[in-house]
Amino acid sequence: MALSREQLAQRVAKEMQDGFYVNLGIGIPTLVANYIPDGMQVMLQSENGLLGMGEFPTEDAIDADLINAGKQTVTAVAGASFFSSAESFAMIRGGHVDLTVLGAFEVDVNGSIASWMIPGKLIKGMGGAMDLVAGADNIIVTMMHADKYGNSKLLPLCELPLTGYGCIKRVMTDLAFIEIKDGAFHLLERAPGVSVEEIIAKTAGKLIVPEHVPEMVF
Amino acid sequence: MAGFNKVVHSYDEALAGLTDNMTLMVGGFGLCGIPEGLINHMVKLGVTGLTAISNNAGVDDFGLGLLLKQRQISTMIASYVGENATFEQQMLSGELNVILTPQGTLAEKIRAGGAGIPAFFTATGYGTPIADGKETREIKGRHYVLEESLTADFALVRAWKADTMGNLVFRKTAANFNPMMATAGKITVVEAEEIVQPGELDPNHIHTPGIYVDRVIQASFEKRIEQRTVKAAK
């Protein structure tokens, strides 16, 4: 079975380490915050100027001056800090964030990512995505392996305009956990009950499959 | 005004000298930390042909959306404009020129502008449409794009506390683009929730020193929330 959005987030959360500063994008990446292992301390960075993002506030604690990058009202944890957008992107561009998780429309075997623009459709802007992919070393892209017609989103070469060139090393899809290196996708893990054959069929870019592909553990 | 007293008492004074075809920076992220009263007064003034530099474009009936509705903005420099139907329609019809800029590059362009740096190299956007027509350079094995800095005729800033000399303190994530913009306007106008006397703000805790600020006006704010997300009380 392909992973649900929640399961995908749960598997990504296992890549966190105690003491990590983490930036989570909008969508599935946001859900990752719900699965941070007990006893592990992680500080969430929100690029609008908050390090140490907490959960949503209770109704009586809502503060219009305290939002996340998705413009949702949030709280700040003990030890949090506020800062300007320039400072925020100094952290991101300067490589100070330990793990970045964001979504994508397409990735390719060169580690390029397309996530912000579909020609002919309305362009809303890239927000901070281009800075995040250019600045971070440790990025996990979360995405569906194929579109609803079964067309692969893991390509030999991205077809959509890029968000970043050659910057993605790991991709977590609803079917598989994949590493990108040496101009190919490398299959690391498969979703429980998903066959290697299905992953091969839905991966358009060159895919290296080892002899044994373990199932994901949650 | 006398000496370092930068307080003005009307929006006409606050925006004196603002005319058609000027370039403006407007602070805020979404609707958080926007100078609401200054924007509303620009609608009243009816200035047109404006170039607006702001991370977002407001919503249809609040923030910069109000200026868009009146067709007062001809060029918009922003990183994300997803929440505004008026904007979409004007962009698609071609009457609004939109320069989409990565958020971190936008912040740094403004920071650099205020700091007298004409341009800088960044890896952001290399190999993407953002780099089209721009100089690129390989430095220590990595590719970078040359991005030029930004300044403006007016920077419109929202602060939490200001003293009469223009020293500023921002509150929580309402800071966002405001501190950089305060440095990059030929005329920087600050709309503050509270104005205090010099000495009342701890010099250790001032975010923006008064040297960058030209005018300060006291205001009350609606502080509209875009995405009201809550958890159940225990």
Image (cartoon, coloured by chain):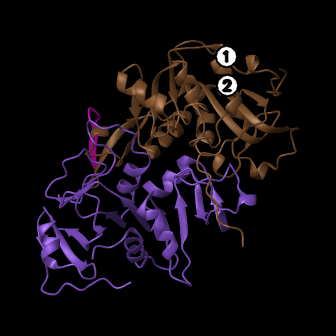
Chain colours: A purple, B brown
Quick check: can you spot residue B97? no
Instruction: Name the quadrant containing residue B211.
Output: top right
Read off the residue under disc 2: B40
| Percent x, y of residue B15 | 69, 19
| Percent x, y of residue B1 | 83, 20
Q: Residue A65 carries which label?
A: none
- A128 in relation to B231, above or below: above
Distance from label 1 to label 2 (Cα)? 7 Å
Read off the residue under disc 1: B44
- A58 in relation to B20, above or below: below
For disc 2, the neighbor class at 10 Å (few under 14, some 14 to 19, many from 20) is some
Q: Residue at x 27, y 77 (%)?
A: A1
Decide if residue A148 is on the left or right side of residue B86: left
Which one is in front, A156 or A124? A124
Label pair 1/2, CB-CB below 8 angstroms: yes
Secondary element under disc 2, as helix, strand or loop, is helix
Query: Mark 2 falls within which chain?
Result: B
